Image (cartoon, rainbow, N blue to C red):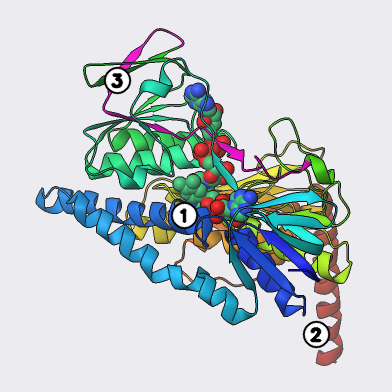
Amino acid sequence: MEEHIDLLVIGGGTAGIVGAKTAVRLGARTVLVEQARTGGDCLWTGCVPSKTLLSAAAQAAAARQRTGAEPNYDAVRARIHETIRAIEPEDSPEALEAFGVTALHGSARFIAPGEATVDGKLIRFRQALIATGSTPAIPPIQGLENAPFVTSETIWDLPSLPPRLLVLGGGPMACELGQAFARLGSEVTLLARSGLLPKEDDDASSLVRSSLERDGVTVLHEEAARVSTADGTTAVSTGTGESVETDVVLIAAGRAPRVGNLGLDTVGVDCDDAGQVLVDGSMRTSNRSIWAAGDVTQYPKFTHLAGVYSSTAASNAVLGLRRTVSRDAPRVTFTSPEVAAVGKTDASGPGETTSTVTLQDTDRAVTEGTKEGFVRLVIGKRGRILGGTIVGPRAGESLGELAVAVSQKMTTRQLAGVTHAYPTYNDALWNAAIAHARSGLDSRLVQRATGALSSLVRRRQERRRRHGST
Ligand SMILES: Cc1cc2nc3c(=O)[nH]c(=O)nc-3n(C[C@H](O)[C@H](O)[C@H](O)COP(=O)(O)OP(=O)(O)OC[C@H]3O[C@@H](n4cnc5c(N)ncnc54)[C@H](O)[C@@H]3O)c2cc1C
Ligand SMILES: NC(=O)c1ccc[n+]([C@@H]2O[C@H](COP(=O)([O-])OP(=O)(O)OC[C@H]3O[C@@H](n4cnc5c(N)ncnc54)[C@H](O)[C@@H]3O)[C@@H](O)[C@H]2O)c1
């Protein structure tokens, strides 16, 4: 390709696909390069298979309770493959080409400012977008290399349900997959050195822990120290000397950016100590014509952020803008109960407070027999909703409303003023806003003001009655 293209997109996952389509919509000549299969982690090894697995596991647990029937793991695997097959065409090279993106198969590498190669072939570009994603981080644990371990990339290939599964990690991936495999019938141990969902509200994390334990998961708040494998048995020992035997180890200990062999030094793209590409709020790297989005950057690693941030990066690159991204980062961990959060989740700033309503006080939850869950709003000065956490069934769906409230800078009074249908799970969110808005009305100053107003109205009405009666 001798002439310059407008935008070179490296990586065909969510960030790459959305970025490339955005650029084409803006009239840019865009080339997307993917070294493996377009669709990326979300489609092949992340969100799509894991959410299908969770759904199948929840149904299996319900069926076991109803009839005692044990799940058929082959059928679960078949369902996962079917789901991927149904979504795959949307992300295919053919779909990209039909949209106007030139899709190339190969591995891209920067070789000089404005120049990259794809498997040795030269491409000249005006702007580039790095969207190369991440791979599972493998912690340096003695003996792990000889153990039968799987990651989010390989767990889908297990030929049968492991009788015992040790999950290393306590983040969203460990909690979701740990619960799913326990519900399917594996004996699951979770080894989580920072506890469960350490980035979320403590009460949310406690509810998830109790729920996992009810599903039979053993949760150890410890770090893996050593792994030994002999005669087909693997034992993982912890820092405190406890040892857990297992058939398979699942590593769910975070992510490492895919930056190897990209030639970032050649073009002056800076990374942090973990190798993540550093971008500013407009998603521009330290090289003025190179942008980045998705898991490869320092921002939280979620599909929706990969898409939205990449769209901003591509439009900034193509139109010469510096629009910045929102850092509110809505997120959902799809355990049972779901944990959904956006914006601030603790009242750590001056003048900040929280308003909490439990699902025990929410009629929809009572009618459905749901006992666990809550909504907690984090509220700033003058009643502005800064963020919050929702735990319970369909918390991920309720999060949409909270995300709107946060992004639109709504106050609790404004949210309280929106009529909600009864009985819904979102009543909890509404009631948390009402409770806070009312507490403002209960303050002594407001009581004095409303008292004075109502006595004024009373006197006026009295006067009118007297005049009317004469
Ligand atoms: C088990 C699991 C469950 C998850 N569940 C959720 C969820 O429910 N919700 C959610 O929001 N997020 C979820 N995530 C996170 C989500 O999958 C990622 O945030 C998202 O897929 C990142 O997209 P990306 O485009 O940045 O990277 P990727 O999808 O990894 O895409 C990067 C692509 O770049 C290609 N590439 C790399 N280097 C080169 C090169 N030099 N040349 C050409 N191509 C290259 C790779 O082959 C890859 O296809 C989950 C992740 C996991 C592991
Ligand atoms: N529902 C979702 O949106 C969803 C689901 C799964 C994964 N993801 C994304 O995928 C990425 C990967 O998920 P994750 O859960 O692996 O990452 P994570 O970084 O959120 O959690 C990893 C956890 O593993 C623990 N850990 C690391 N090394 C350990 C060791 N040696 N012993 C014990 N514990 C150890 C860490 O303390 C940490 O809490 C995340 O960024 C997440 O956002 C999202």
Q: How far from the left and from the top, in percent, is residue 361?
A: 46, 52
Q: Is residue 120 left or right of residue 227?
A: right
- CA separation, marks 2 and 3? 89 Å
Q: Against 219, is 60 above or below?
A: below
Please state, as top left, top right, bottom left or bottom right, where the N terminus lies in the image. Answer: bottom right
Residue at 67% across / 39% down in the picture? 346
Residue range in magenta is 239-264
Where, by quadrant of the figure, is residue 124 drawn?
bottom right
- Badge 1 residue CB within 8 Å of ligand 1: yes
The residue at 47%/26% (across/down) is 192
Q: Answer with mark 3 or mark 1, whichever residue precedes in sequence.
A: 1
Q: Circle 2: is it few (<14), some (14-19), or many (20+) Cα within 10 Å?
A: few
Decide if ligand 2 comes within 8 Å of the CB at mark 2.
no
In this figure, which residue is indicated by the disc labeled 1?
47
Q: Secondary structure at mark 1?
A: helix
Residue ID for mark 3: 234
Q: Residues within 10 Å of mark 3 (few under 14, many from 20)?
A: many
Name the amino acid, label 2.
Answer: Arg
Name which residue type carries label 1. Cys
